[in-house]
Image (cartoon, grey):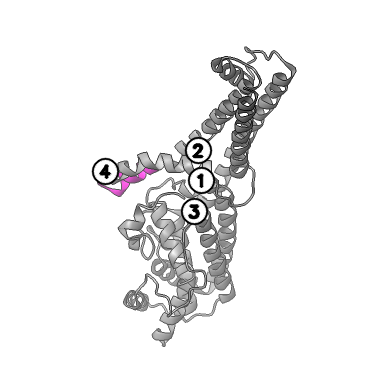
Amino acid sequence: MIAINIFVFILGALLAALTLISAFKTLVLPRGSRDFLTYFAFKLTWVFFLPATRLTRSYEQRDRIMAFYAPLTLMLLPASWLFLIIVAYSMMYWAAGVRPLAEAFLLSGSSLFTLGFARAETLFTLVLVFTEAALGLSMVALLIAYLPAMYSAFQRREQAVNLLEVRAGSPASAVEWIQRAYRINWLASMGEQFGSWENWFADLEESHTSLSPLVFFRSPQPDRSWITASGAVLDTAAMMLAIVNVQFEDVEAQLCLRAGYLALRRISDVFGIQYKEDASYPEDPISISREEFLAACAELQQSGVPLKTDLEQGWRDYAGWRINYDQPLLALAALTKAPYAPWSSDRSIQGMRDISPG
């Protein structure tokens, strides 16, 4: 009997430790870290949301459903942690002599929520009661600090996404952004724009890896998305460098591109999305065809945008930049079920669009 008690106590202690590690990785650790319990919560919720999205007839209906996905899972996570803590300490109380199991469960719940209607009978169980009460208060404090931090990062992200519609239309596209910049004589100042987006990508990487549920938080407007905005910004920078014949701060565009594809890759790593890290063109293909690129160049030329004469070299230069972020961009667009946008979510194949979190 003593051996069984020791085994149950160790099992309960391990369950409590794993739950605390999960909460620590999700709420405290300032870096992307794959956690089993958090992954399981998102996966379990996805089981119910995926059939619902497949039954929708329009993107607007699917977007309304998906808007509840991340917030609902976030509500389930703390409930799951608290329930596991109660179960873990119930096992330890039972092993310490609190009988029957229902009485151990009652003592665990009373201690975790600091209700105090059940009392410990021995010094050892009293120590367990104090530790469980401290864990309960600590987790509540962490959750109180966690949600404001998450919504602050969400607000910073969406402010830039909203401003992009003014510059690049809705859905945002590189061609539209360059055309509008040309019409208002702003092409030479595009470097300043890319400088601010470099900072946005740096913030995106930090927030969406350490606070990974943010990836699934959808924009207030159904036709906007952080991932399609990322694609539009990166494509604009790549096309400005590759084909637009105007003097501007091209270093800012290059830095923006590097910050952007590194951010998308780091976020992809958190969700186990595979991509070729050392991909290069023309050895590796991209999702944009040469004909699509030349058609975009023709549209820019018709609008009066000055272009470089060597379009073939421009295509090679553009493809050389696009290869760095092509795979992560499409995979994240599929993962988040992003709205339609040219050169990003519009070419996520059906199999990718049903990709699940983790």
Of the residues tagged 4 and 3, which is closer to the observer?
Answer: 3
Rendered residue at 31%/77% (across/down)? 291
Place of residue 119 in the rendered image (x, y in percent of width and height, measured from the top left): 66, 13
Which residue position is annotated with label 3? 271
Is 20 displayed left or right of 158 in the figure?
right
Which residue position is annotated with label 1? 213
Real-space CA distance between mark 2 and mark 1, rounded to the nearest whole angstrom: 8 Å
Q: Is residue 237 above or below residue 267?
A: below
Q: Amino acid at mark 4?
A: Leu
Place of residue 297 in the rendered image (x, y in percent of width and height, measured from the top left): 37, 77
For the residues bearing labels 3 and 1, Cβ distance under 8 angstroms: no
Residue interval drawn in magenta: 56-66
Mark 3 lies on a secondary structure that is loop
Is 222 displayed left or right of 84 in the figure?
left
Q: Amino acid at mark 3?
A: Phe
Chain-order first, disc 3 or disc 2? 2
Of the residues tagged 3 and 2, which is closer to the observer?
Answer: 3
For the residues bearing labels 2 and 1, Cβ distance under 8 angstroms: yes
Q: Amino acid at mark 1?
A: Pro
Real-space CA distance between mark 3 and mark 2, rounded to the nearest whole angstrom: 17 Å
**Residue toward you, 158 or 2:** 2
